[in-house]
Amino acid sequence: MSVISPRSRGEAPPLPRPRSRPASSVPRTDDVRRVGRRLRPSAEDRDVLWLYLLTRTALWTTAYCARWLFPADAGTRDAGPVLAPFERWDWGHFLNVARDGYFPTGNGPGDVDRDNREAFFPGFPLALRAVHTVVPHWTAAGLLISFVAGGIAVLALVRVARLYLPDPRAGRRTAQLLLLSPCAVFLAAGYSESLFLALALPAWLAAHRRNWPLAATLAALATAVRVSGLFLAAALALHFVLTARTRADRRPLPWLALPALPALLYTWYLQSRTGDWMAWKHAQERGWYRRFHTPWDAWSTTWESAFGHVQTTGYAFMFQAELLAMVIGLILTALLIRRRRWPEAAYVGLSLWALGTSYWYQSVPRATLLWWPLWITLAAWSLRAPRFRTAYLCLAAPLSTLFAVTFLTGRWAG
């Protein structure tokens, strides 16, 4: 449709009316400033990021020193590659999947690579492969993912802590306790914990703001990274049930099924290549003895391994740490139930059930990094009792250094 202006009809143009132009054509300076304020880091964010950078620097320094003080060959004059301390344990599985895929030697079940790489969900390897297109060194690419994701995670943790604790120091304190925790080295290594937290914590924030599509999408991405995303999905579903009051509140219910999709797709993919619907579980069993056992049997076996003089000292020490972490998790779950924090109790409790019903305990200390209710609870105690904070830091500092050196020198599991 053509538009004929007043000037083309020979008419005088109308006088401008004394009112503003339509809102769509007016620069919304207030909106721009509001968005800018949201994107600009607050003073608290800058403090937390500064702490995050300092703790990363401390871990990198520890890695550099450990590389020289504890070389693989005691008689060598070469400390080895600078990033070699971070190329430990699960990193090899993530690297193999990112570089070669899950089934590099063939398609049939008889050709499955027996390094049990199917036990690892594809989220982190996919991210690693993507970053590797920009960062050619695989280990550097993995460290970069964890570094960026860890920064996002601690900023999200600050905001999650504000949901529970009114004290303005709560966010910084919670981040401090997490970053100085005994297993904090795994947040800096090329492992999946940082990436998982960078997705799970914003999902929890979105759920508290009742943005269920965003919460479900982030939880689905977290599930693609770690099976713990399913525990997060269960907690989100319970939170939805407890907070949905009206019919309008219940409309986003179908979104809660989304986090299960990555696990289903991964299961289907493994079955299509191996013919085994339980390929992920069987890989866990082959590599880490994760066959179902009753909780008391798992406790008994771990106790025997820790104190029965049936393992070398390195393994025995790790099993002792597993027992301690399990006790902490049980106490935390009991506290959450007592305070009627049902979604948080479900999240931690499901994690404990998964880790505490295998042949023996494995990776429970690492799992504490994912229990944000633990760090918020400890922060609350430290804010009420300054002596508790002092005691925690005095105990956590040497343990954190010890665990870091143990991991960085390849002695984590004996």
Image (cartoon, grey):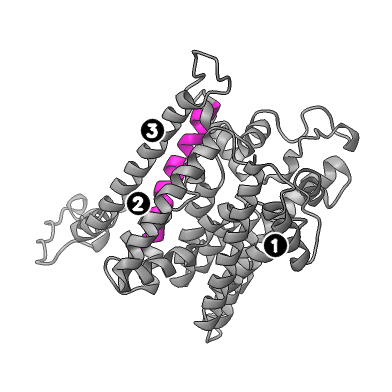
The amino acid beneath tag 1 is Gly
In this figure, what is the number of numbered marks?
3
Give me the residue at 31% from left, 59% from top. 172
Q: Label 3: how many residues lie within 10 Å, few (<14), some (14-19) or many (20+)?
A: few
Which of labels 2 and 1 is toward the front?
1
Q: Main secondary structure of the magenta part?
A: helix
Q: Camera-side residue: 93 or 200? A: 93
Q: Nearer the viewer, residue 263 or 68?
A: 68
Mark 2 to mark 1: distance in Å?
A: 74 Å
Separation (CA) of disc 3 from disc 1 = 34 Å
Mark identifier at residue 61: 3
Residue 375 in picture, x, y percent from top left: 44, 63
Q: Which mark is residue 356?
A: 1
- Secondary element at tag 1: loop
Q: Position of residue 217 (x, y in %)?
A: 56, 58
**In the image shown, does 253 or 31 lie closer to the viewer?**
253
Which residue type carries mark 3? Thr
